[in-house]
Image (cartoon, grey):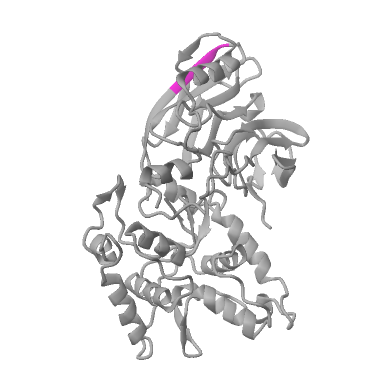
Amino acid sequence: MARAIVRVPATAKRGQIIEIKALVGHIMETGFRRTEIGTLIPRDIIRLFVCTYNGEEILRADFHPAVAANPLIEFTTIATESGKLEFKWTGDNLFSASESAEITVE
Amino acid sequence: MGRDTRAMQDDDATNPATLWVLDGEALWNQKAGAAGKACADCHSSMKGVAARYPALHAGKLLNLDQRINACRVERQKAPALQLESRDLLALSAWVGRQSRGMPIDIEVTEQLKPYLESGRAAFNRREGQLNIACAQCHDERWGARLAGNPIPQAHPTGYPIYRLEWQGVGSLQRRLRNCMIGVRAEPYEYGSPEFVELELYLMWRARGMKLETPAVRP
Amino acid sequence: MTTRRDFLVLACGLAAGTAHATPDSMQEAVGKVTGGRPVTKGKVKLDVAPLIENGNSVVLSVSVDSPMTAAEHVKAIHLFSPANPLPNMVSVYLGPRSGRARFTTRVRVADSQTLLAVAQLSDGSFWSDSVAVVVTLAACTEEVK
């Protein structure tokens, strides 16, 4: 099952600010919804998103139930060197998804 | 459809339906059924296919989802996927995506005419406790506002869609069920001939418009 | 048959009878982040459409005017809602490697309200922006299953 999609430019110049997009498939059940007969549907959300660049954290985000289903985050980072960007989402019920992308920096 | 929604739709990296498209691609390449065949084993390009549905297959009018199931049962010797199931929507999203940008092309043959007329009659027929026909909003009052939202012409150019209201992907029939509930009518069952005929009419009505599958809609 | 209001309540994740975020709980949530320090309006730009098509998924961007150097940068941007069931929406932690103090995401907005973005700078100061949004109902929906 496709869990996550990330977009990172394949190449960049050293020092260039690059745009990153990261989308993950998740229902983000708020914990406030009820079924037709009134039973509360338990919370089931992603809590944390971390992005690392060659092992060093470049962005972290705390998600709350207000984050929409199939969360998307777009952010920037400075292209410092060639290597790997890793994306990790963790949350309730031992949820874990990860993706990575390579970048070549000239 | 607002500017933000359109931007969400046009970029595969921000369109949540891309997750379904990727799942569909995986299913397309996966061997299935007693015949042990994947869709990809028989089919090469699916470009243009979604733009021509609903269509007649072995004398029956089928929409794309039903046609996918027909292949599964007849060729792959696999059980049909449940209508509106995640797997079927994923396959339908992937197949539809192959026709993105292509004009909707429903060729009205003699055999197709009665189905088209049936669909047209359904579109123009008052229904539900509110006693409203599709045509009254979508032919006569498009552009006006209902509960703060603009009334669209209701062309199914992007199905299956990621509907923000559903927070997930669904078919045109699911959307039509929402419309029927909206006018307090008893919705047709998924896969019913009434629905497929209405789909046919709607696609014919949208002929020439470019397919946007998978679209994002409020 | 659920009424329109009941349906909106169900769909947007508010259970009938659940406490909404109150002005007090919002103050408390903001206070947890600022430690009681003053928050000045400015430097921050919260970009969100004033008329929202569907409260389930609202595109939102926050940017902060900052050089993003090691000496002077944005450490975190927090988003708050006074009318959702909970006041905290999302918190994003940045740093000098970010290049720009900016992010875009999609949030749920339960009702028409004024959203608040608070940025924490490396010098310990707090800055904010707020935008009033109106949430409309989707026409033609289905029962919640």
- Please, is residue A56 above or below residue B153 in the view? above
Res B153 → quadrant = bottom left
Residue drawn at x 73%, y 75% is B31
Residue drawn at x 57%, y 18% is C120
Between C88 and A106, the residue placed more toward the observer is: C88
Residue found at the very far top of the displayed protein: C37
* Magenta stretch: helix, strand or loop mostly: strand
Residue found at the very far right of the displayed protein: A55
Q: Which residues are magenta?
A: C125-129
Residue found at the very far left of the displayed protein: B140
Residue B162, x across and y down, in percent: 50, 55
Residue C92, x across and y down, in percent: 60, 29
In-image side of A11 versus B13 (left or right): right
Residue drawn at x 60%, y 62% is B86
Between C69 and B22, the residue placed more toward the observer is: B22
Between B128 and B25, the residue placed more toward the observer is: B128
- Please, is residue B75 above or below residue B174 in the view? below
Residue drawn at x 48%, y 31% is C84
Res B112 → quadrant = bottom left
Residue B27, x across and y down, in percent: 67, 68
